Image (cartoon, helix red, strand yellow):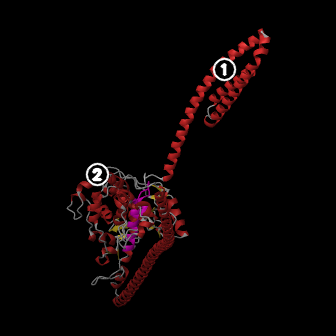
Amino acid sequence: MASSSNDPGSLVTLHFHDFRVERMRHWWTLLGEDDHADIVGVFGKFPPFMRLQVDRGLLEALASFWDPTHCCFSIGEVDLVPTLEEYAELLQLASPFSETPVIPIQGPRSNRCLEKYLGLTTAVLLRLARDFIAGKRGWKKFRINAFKIAFAGIFLFPTSAGRIDLGVIPLVFSEGRSIIPAILCETVRSLSYCRRQGDGIPMFCTQLLQLWFCSHLRHFYRLQTPYHFERHTVTWGPAVWKPWTHCALFDGVPLPGVWGCTGYYPSLALRQFGGVQYPPCLGDLDAVTFDYIPSEDMWRLLSRVEVIWEGRLSEVVLIEDGSPGDSSVASDFVEWREGWTPFFTLRPTVRPGTSHSLVSRSLRVSASTGQPERVTVLERELEKAQTELLSLRLARAAEREASAARVESLRSTLHHNSVAVANLRRDLEAQRGNVSTLRTMNEFIREQLEISEDAKDQLAETLAETREQLETEQAERTRVQDELDSLRSYTQALVDPATGRPQDIVALRRALDASEEALTSTRTSMGAMRVQISVLQGDNGVLQTELDLVHDALESNASWLNQEGFPVVTALHQINQVMDSLGARARAVLEEHDEGNPALSTALGRFCRETCIRLGR
């Protein structure tokens, strides 16, 4: 298949960003072995890619040979297609496929991704004027995620603006899913756009595409190449491929990416896998080619892509050992290849000095039979007609090319406008998010001001209350001081100047001394009384004896009573009076001094009672 890229004037111009790869390499060296293992598990063995120097001239030449209609490199009669399996092998990943491809989820993008994977909360965004790194502990927790996002946004999915797009975050952290389809998708989309426009910014992994192309060069590892790719980083040897060639519901394989979706035809690359190249079935890639512009159509197309992805098939007939060299291409493929209309047609040209004699053999024979004049006229007319026909063909070809160019220009313009609209919508959503953030900040600041005003009022009230309390305490302190002064004056008035003691205490002491003297006197009187009582008890015994004698005498001699009875009765009456007097006195003394001594009162009462009984007899 011919291509207009063979014309040196059709070379595609690529504009490359300077992403400061040295800083990424230095960042990689700062991470530990555990961090390296975690990152390699997502991106594969990519460290050599950071040391690979991009050959810009080679990539521009490759982009010039890209056919956006069939999504392949068409170089002469050879078609080369970057495939999922080859990219997976270059990155040394286990498998390029998964049960479910990485498809965007429904919902607007927001800064919550940064909060989830980098710890950048809204409060941190408010302090963006300063460094957002929240200390060594916080950065150590999120630095692996930050490196993943930076590597994906710089090496794998660079943007035309030179910024890291938030769309790479869900792709990087989609566990159990492969990123190879997205890498190949953005490679195909960017190459097609640059080829149609004639220039552009490569929004794909240029290092990976360069290494893939060099791997198809014969004896590549023996050549002294300018790519600075070390030999020991690639393992050379035969590979057994079982690639996916098409899907049950689609002639190719869909490729969901970061900013859009497309597809490609792996059946064009059967020779790359060591298989026999048959004529492929080429469907319409427009069915799976669209940009991620949020709408109902986009989600419907994504659902269809997911259904198509589940029906992947592999049909490859491997070339047996010992087969002839031309057995890799089927005969019907050669015929099909010759009839394949290229996307970019060459402008037909007429070489100067070339003979265009189109006189048929019959006319030449008739000229030799004797009609030279007639033949000459016919030849002139025929030559004139052929010239006019050629001019008409050239004009029609020019018109077709102009129409095709206009159509492609319109398609490119439409694609560019669609991308621009998508970018504007993304920017609008980002601006809306920023406006929402600013509104939140404004509300937060307003709340803080209100809280500050309330706090100010509370502080003023507290200050007034404190002043009132201080005044009250000052008045109370003055009152207490006055009471202390009056108490001190009263105390000084109570002190006896002679003894230095309070006068009331001196009087109490004197009364106490008088009471003690009275108590001592009373005790002395009671002792005398006890002695008298003892004497009375003795007298009572004598009287009892006498009474007994009198009683005996009365019983023995009644006449004696008449003679001696009156004096005895008189004596008893006197004794009774004395006893009454002593008893009354003892009772008075007892009531005055020993009211609290029940034993003494009881003994004295019993003595008086016995005395009265005996006297009564």
Disc 1 marks which amino acid? Answer: Asn
Which quadrant would residue 36 be assigned to in this image?
A: bottom left
Q: Residue 318, which numbered label?
A: none
Residue 80 can be seen, yes or no: no
Predominant secondary structure, magenta span: helix
Is residue 515 magenta-colored?
no
Q: Quadrant of the N terminus?
A: bottom left
Position of 428 with respect to 157 (left or right) is right
Q: Residues within 10 Å of mark 2 (few under 14, many from 20)?
A: few
**Mark whose residue sits in front, 1 or 2:** 1
Q: Which mark is residue 540?
A: 1
How far across and how far down the image is residue 461, in percent?
51, 71
**Of 587 and 412, which appears nearest the observer?**
587
Kind of residue indicated by mark 2: Gly
Q: What residue is at 32 percent from the left and 64 percent from the top?
A: 209
In front: 507, or 309? 507
Q: Which residues are magenta?
A: 169-194
Q: Which residue corresponds to the image point at 44% horizontal and 66% vertical from the top-left?
A: 123
- Residue 131 vs residue 493: left or right? left
> Is residue 470 or residue 530 the one in the foreground?
530
Residue at 27% from the left image edge and 71% from the top image edge: 57
Secondary element under disc 2, as helix, strand or loop, is loop
592 up-or-down from 563: above or below: below
